[in-house]
Image (cartoon, rainbow, N blue to C red):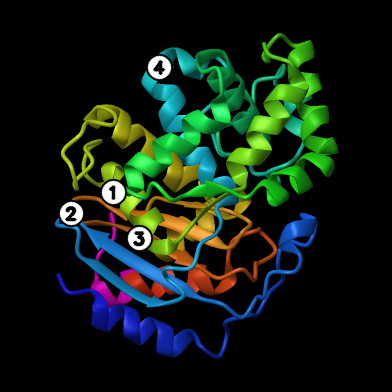
Amino acid sequence: MNYQPTLDRIYAALKPVIGEGKVASYIPELASVSPDQFGMAVVDFAGNVFAVGDATKRFSIQSISKLFALTLAFQREGDSLWSRVGREPSGNPFNSLVQLEREQGIPRNPFINAGALVITDMLAAQYDDPQEALLNFVRDLANAPGVQINGRVGESEVRTSSRNAAMAHFMKSFGNLNNRVGEVITAYCHHCAIEMSCVELARAVGFLANKGVNPLNGSVVIDPSSAKRLSALMLTCGTYDAAGDFAFRVGLPAKSGVGGGIVAILPGECGICVWSPALEESGNSHAGSMALEMFTSLTGRSIF
């Protein structure tokens, strides 16, 4: 399918609202990002790229990295991973401490910060350099060897990671964190500081739309059953505590980040990414959420 006319129509319709919302100012290096930016890309299984706006401009992927970290950990851990992290929506902000005490240090899901710290702890046990391991993984998925970690953003996040460190220490007290807290926090913050473009991210999530197989080179990333399960988690937990409303409006598995990016998959067809830095209260991109809602409405394509 030729998605270009649809993307052109979305871009034209959303120009008046691009910039509405607030950038993630609690991360110092992201506070200065201009909110008046927008990019969107669709990459199909044949490798065709459909794009508008700032689709080739790299940005901080932030919590989108949690999807790739989970996939990488799952390759090694398999279903044993779920003994340390749950699969339920949290209903609370992504950096909340509230549920951890009530649930004995087991995070609700791998897409909230506490869950991502547990996943990073697994990667720290599996790899000598978990930062480089995840970076190389996303480079391979996106066929983009030039993808890098922005060290300034990573260090900025480490310096302001007191709440994440508190969660990590709390989980360690319950025996659900095995490595040094400082090591886990540093790796996690630098995972979030990976910079990619909409085109690269749309290409990188293609394996989830294709039953675990990278459609561009035929390599098996995960098995079909695992791809189904990770996609289900994206639908139920991938857009912070607004996941229910997002699923209602958009109808696609998605994972967002406070850098303004949202990746989504249309099973059997393509990977999608939209980026606009100005966020809604939930932490999801305002224009990005609207763009994906328009995409499914205009194309008549969703998982439902």
Tell me the amino acid under the disc marked 3.
Answer: Ile
Residue drawn where x is 67% and y is 14% of the image? 176
Asked whether, in this view, residue 280 is left or right of residue 16, the answer is right
Compared with 250, 215 (above or below) is: above
Compare marks 1 and 4 and give the one earlier in the sequence: 4
Nearest the viewer among 39 and 248 is 39
Residue interval drawn in magenta: 296-304
**89 relative to 38, above or below:** above
Q: Name the residue under label 2.
A: 45
- Name the amino acid, label 1: Gly
Q: Name the residue under label 4.
A: 76
Distance Cα–Cα, label 2 vs label 4 = 26 Å
Query: Residue 168: image x %, image y %?
Result: 75, 24
Q: Which residue is located at x 68 percent, y 44 percent? A: 94
Determine the image quadrant of residue 169. Answer: top right
Disc 3/disc 1 C-alpha distance (Å): 8 Å
